[in-house]
Amino acid sequence: MASSKGSKSKASSGGSAQQSNPGSAVSNAAAQKQQIIQNAKNQIYLHYNQMMTAISGVENTASAVSHHAGIADQSMNTVQTVWKGDNAQAYGRKAQNFGADIRNTANKIAGEAASLRARADAIRQADLDALSKI
């Protein structure tokens, strides 16, 4: 019997300790909420930085394509100055068109990179705005 009285007093004292400090539970919940929000923000910034790294790769590709278009133009100019055959002008025009196509492709790639960058910024901001409303 003595043991059942001891367990009752322990149970009742444990319950009263939790009830005596309800502010502690509220502050723990608030701290947990802040931690969850901070973790979510960290994930948002991590993914944003990963997107920006990928977009930088796309921009570098556009730059490289544009650079190679310039090299192709220089090469064709050299060929045109040296080649004096009957078909030289026709091939020169084809080469100019090809160079223009390469430059257009580079511009389209750069435009897509800019569009991706704007979308990534918008997604990051929307995610942060959503978190601020929690």
Image: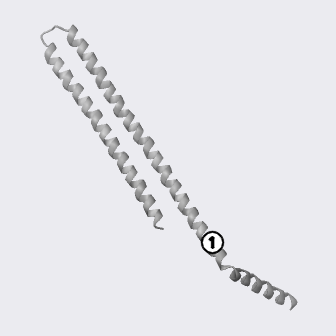
The residue that mark 1 highlights is 27
Mark 1 belongs to which amino acid?
Answer: Ser
- Residue 12: where, in percent of width, then height? 75, 86
The single residue placed furthest to the right in the displayed view is: 2
- Which of the pair 21/12 is nearer the observer? 21
Left or right? Give the position of 112 relative to 129: left
Residue 36 vertical position relative to residue 2 in the rendered view, above or below: above
Residue 93 vertical position relative to residue 122 in the rendered view, above or below: above
- Which residue is at 65% across, 79% downward? 22
The single residue placed furthest to the left in the displayed view is: 86
- Which residue is at 51% across, 54% downward? 43
- The colour style of the image is one colour
In the rendered image, the quadrant that contains the N terminus is bottom right
Left or right? Give the position of 128 relative to 25: left
Q: Element under label 1?
A: helix
- Residue 90: where, in percent of width, then height? 14, 18
Residue 63 vertical position relative to residue 87 in the rendered view, above or below: below
The single residue placed furthest to the bottom in the displayed view is: 1
Left or right? Give the position of 53 relative to 106: right
- Residue 3: where, in percent of width, then height? 85, 87
Residue 130 quadrant: bottom left
- Which residue is at 55% across, 63% downward? 36
- Which of the pair 128/46 is nearer the observer? 128
- Which of the pair 98/113 is nearer the observer? 113
Residue 84 quadrant: top left
Label 1: how many residues lie within 10 Å, few (<14), some (14-19) or many (20+)? few
- Which residue is at 20% across, 12% downward? 80
Q: How many marks?
A: 1
- Residue 91: where, in percent of width, then height? 17, 18
